[in-house]
Amino acid sequence: MDKLRKGLYQVSEGLELIIALVAVIGVVIATLNLFPELLLYWQNRTDAEAFLIFLDAVFDVVIGLEFIKMLCKPSSQNIMEVLIFLIARHMIVQKTSALEDLLSVVSIGILFFFRRFMLATKPDKEQHVPELFGAIRNAGNKKERESTDSEE
């Protein structure tokens, strides 16, 4: 049973790399398509909508690159970066209401909080999810120690 599980895991990793390779090809094509988009924007540079169209194409490439990083080296930090770029793209490029903008800002804030939380705590091999309040307490104690050390 363990051999089958390991075999399936290796197959899934291979498929993940193939998908990453296909995504790289797509990002290269999207990057090449940025040049005609830039020329089109230059021709219509007085139109604010033209800039948003160009910015949308740029965000597509950036999100594609972050997605490739996530496929090649899956980590919670890479996943957070992809989500932050997706929310930022939605907020900047799309026509959104004030409530949608507020929700986007709150969502990015929450993602930054969790990203900081995950970087501040390095779980050991037995514990996969660090304790939230312990991490916050430790981060606060570290700041207090640094401030008292700098005063001395």
Image (cartoon, rainbow, N blue to C red):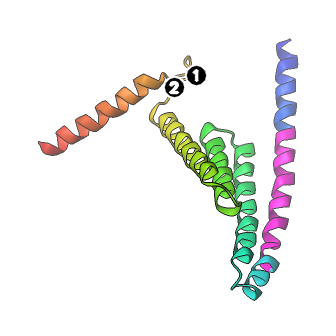
Nearest the camera: 87 or 140? 87
Q: Is residue 14 magenta?
A: no
Q: Secondary structure at mark 1?
A: loop
Where is residue 64 drawn, in percent x and y? 75, 55
* Residue at the (86%, 11%) spot, across then down: 1
Task: Count residues near mark 2 (Cα–Cα under 10 Å), then give few for <14, some for 14-19, many for 20+.
Answer: few
Check disc 1: other Cα within 10 Å, few if <14, some if 14-19, many if 20+.
Answer: few
Q: Marks 1 and 2, how far apart in space?
A: 6 Å
* Residue drawn at point x = 64 percent, y = 56 percent: 91
Disc on the earlier residue, 1 or 2: 2
Q: Given the image, on which type of amino acid does mark 2 rest?
A: Pro
Mark 2 and mark 1 in contact (Cβ < 8 Å)? yes
- Residue type (three-letter) at the residue carrying disc 1: His
Q: Provide the residue designation for mark 2.
A: 123
Name the image quarter holding residue 44: bottom right
Is residue 3 rendered to the left or right of residue 64? Answer: right
Magenta-span inclusion, residue 29: yes
- Front residue (pair 142, 42): 42
- Given residues 7 and 75, the one toward you in this image is 75
Q: Is residue 66 left or right of residue 127?
A: right
Residue for badge 1: 128
Q: Nearer the viewer, residue 124 or 34?
A: 34
- Residue ID at (49%, 38%): 119
Please name the predominant secondary structure of the magenta segment in the image. Answer: helix
Q: What is the secondary structure assignment of the residue under circle 2?
A: loop
Q: Which residues are magenta?
A: 15-35
